Amino acid sequence: MLLGIIFGTLTGLVPGIHINLVGVSLVALSVSFLSPVNPLYLVVFIVAMAITHTFVDFIPSIFLGCPDTDTELSILPGHELLKKGQGYSAILLTCYGSLAAIFLLVLIAVPSFFVVQKAYDFLQNIMPYLLIAVSAVLIILEKKKFSALFVFFLTGALGLSVLNLDIKEPLLPLLTGLFGSSMLVMSIKNKTIVPKQKITKPKIKNKLLSPLLGALIASPLSSLLPGLGSGQAAIIGNTISRTDREGFLVLLGATNTIVMGFSFIALYLISRTRTGAAVAINNLLGNFSWQILVLILIVVFFTGIVSFFLTSILAKFFSKRITKINYAKLSLITLGILIILVLIVSGFFGLIILIFSTLTGIYCISLGVRRTNMMGCLLIPTIIFYLVL
């Protein structure tokens, strides 16, 4: 568990090194180098790493503007607070949401046993139409509806093309370009200047109930519906239970952690994998007992508490030093790391995809719509897959 927390901190802090990559590597090594190791130890490691990642990954998304697909929505409210010298407060707000989510997960675990299976059996029959309906609602909620629809279909076409190519880990260059390197290029171009940050705790009185309610209702949808990520769940949650900018960051933190934690519950109940961590656990254990699920939830609980304090300390550390660092150079170095990672994992064609998806991401950002519309890259292939079944 401690090793998982350490690795989860690294995957959270370094853009591009996602928990999915570590999970896939562990599964591959488990049949060779790690074969003497009890698979249960690897499962505990993966769970601890995944939960820690959901806390820590808001640090680069707010300080660098380089999120993964689960934290892309934090850029706008997070950067607004960062430019006001309140980056530390922004990260703490996501931490409060994630910590509350840990307790909510424990509370909803038992009721899920009686609801999820029946709900999923019903949803399976209407899956593609439900995904179309959710996508339509997300587009309708936009001010620039035509632009949002165009972004949705444009990235959907890109996703279809990339997922049909014969390369390793096609999602790495695709999602890195759309949600990571595109924002970094924009930061370098705009010469972002970060003001001195205040180390003050945000006032959260009367700001927790509404975002947590929205997260609690919307997050399980992401674990039951393929193609939906934390970003879409957060928008749905915010629609159900409206909140302000600070409350939205709490909502994002809670949604990110509930989606990850609930994916383990969903794996046990309906044998479906909705996160990279759940895929890795499924490959290591296959069907597992309720006792192992209880162990996983215990690891989630203790890891969440440790991660809360760890992220708070790291946020304070980076807040004090971010103004001393050349932001453009740091973004350039981060961009270089992403390019190297894509080359190592996905090869030369992966780099070509990264370039195309980065240019697409920059164009979509320039249209002034929510970046979550770019999740059409996953939703459209998923909808088509279910329609032709």
Image: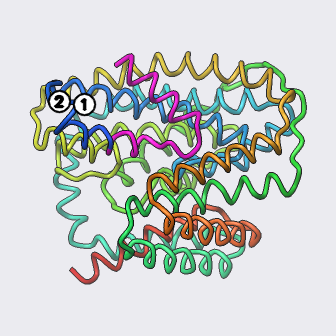
Residue 226: x, y in percent? Answer: 34, 61
**297 horizontally vs 163: left or right:** left
**201 horizontally vs 345: left or right:** right
Viewer-closest of 242 and 81: 81
| Label 1 – label 2 distance at C-alpha | 6 Å
Q: Quadrant of the N terminus?
A: top left
- Position of 75 relative to 138 (above/below): above
Residue 291: x, y in percent? Answer: 12, 26
What's the residue type where badge 1 is placed?
Val
Residue that carries the numbered disc 1 in the rendered image: 43
Residue that carries the numbered disc 2 in the rendered image: 39
Question: Which label is found at residue 330?
Answer: none
Residue at x 17%, y 30% (from the top left corner): 39
Viewer-closest of 373 and 131: 373
CB atoms at circles 1 and 2 under 8 Å apart? yes
Q: Secondary structure at mark 1?
A: helix
Question: For the magenta stretch, what is the residue range?
Answer: 1-24
Viewer-closest of 254 and 362: 362
Q: Quadrant of the C terminus?
A: bottom left
